[in-house]
Amino acid sequence: MKKGMILVLLAVVIMTSFAQDSDNSGLKALVNHHAARNFVSGSIARSDLDAIINAGIRAPSARNQQPWYFTVVQNPDLAQKIVPQSQDGNVLIVVSSFGDGKTNGSQIFDCALATENIYLAAQVLGYGSRIYTGPMDTINSRFKAELGLPSGHSAVALVRVGRVQAGVDAVSAASSRKRANDMVNYK
């Protein structure tokens, strides 16, 4: 519990520093993101893909354990087996960790932070991104060997990254959000 509170306080400090400059691109990325649905065909530049992966690598983790491993799926046939809606050129980034992927709270939280970093980095670079957790049971039961997950690892989440339909933005594509007044209190 103490670790969780420290991470929450750290997030508040970071967000407060972003909020001091309303034109800050970091804050804009956090506020204006949306889970893409309108993916189209088209490749992702290798330099962009490397930057997206590095964002995941740079995520914070409890006791700096960095429990994640990233498997980048560029093979369209394999991507289609995992996410049937995948378009040509979409990349799936599978985030895995040691263990069964369900029992260690800080490990799962750490992988979630890495997953979000990947998700946001893709959008900052102009790509669409979407986080999936639904296919994890299928990945873990059928595709571990084909994906080359390290021995003892299980998939925790995946991020689909790709080109999106022109003209789609956070306002027109995002699902509605709850109002801050309904979810926050200040004491």
Image: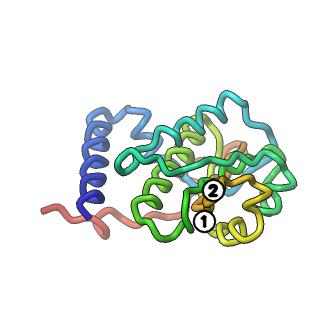
Q: Tell me which corner region of the image, top left, top right, bottom left or bottom right, holds residue 141.
A: bottom right
Marking on residue 149: none
First in sequence, mark 2 or 1: give its number.
1
Residue type marked 2: Leu
Q: Is residue 32 above or below residue 141?
A: above
Instruction: Give the left or right position of residue 146, taking residue 136 as reference.
Output: right
| Residue at 49% across, 51% down | 67
What residue lies at 50% left-to-right and 64% top-to-bottom?
A: 176
In the rendered structure, the answer to whether residue 26 lies left or right of residue 89 reads left
Q: Amino acid at mark 1?
A: Thr
Q: Nearer the viewer, residue 19 or 148?
A: 148
Name the one closer to the observer, 107 or 152.
Answer: 152
In front: 96, or 92?
A: 96
Residue 38: image x %, image y %?
A: 71, 54
Q: Mark 1 — residue?
A: 133
Looking at the picture, how far across and down is residue 112, in whole percent? 48, 56
Per the image, the residue denoted by label 2 is 158
Give x and y (percent) for residue 148: 74, 52
Residue furthest right in the image: 77
Q: For the residues marked 2 and 1, what is the alpha-carbon distance in whole angstroms? A: 7 Å
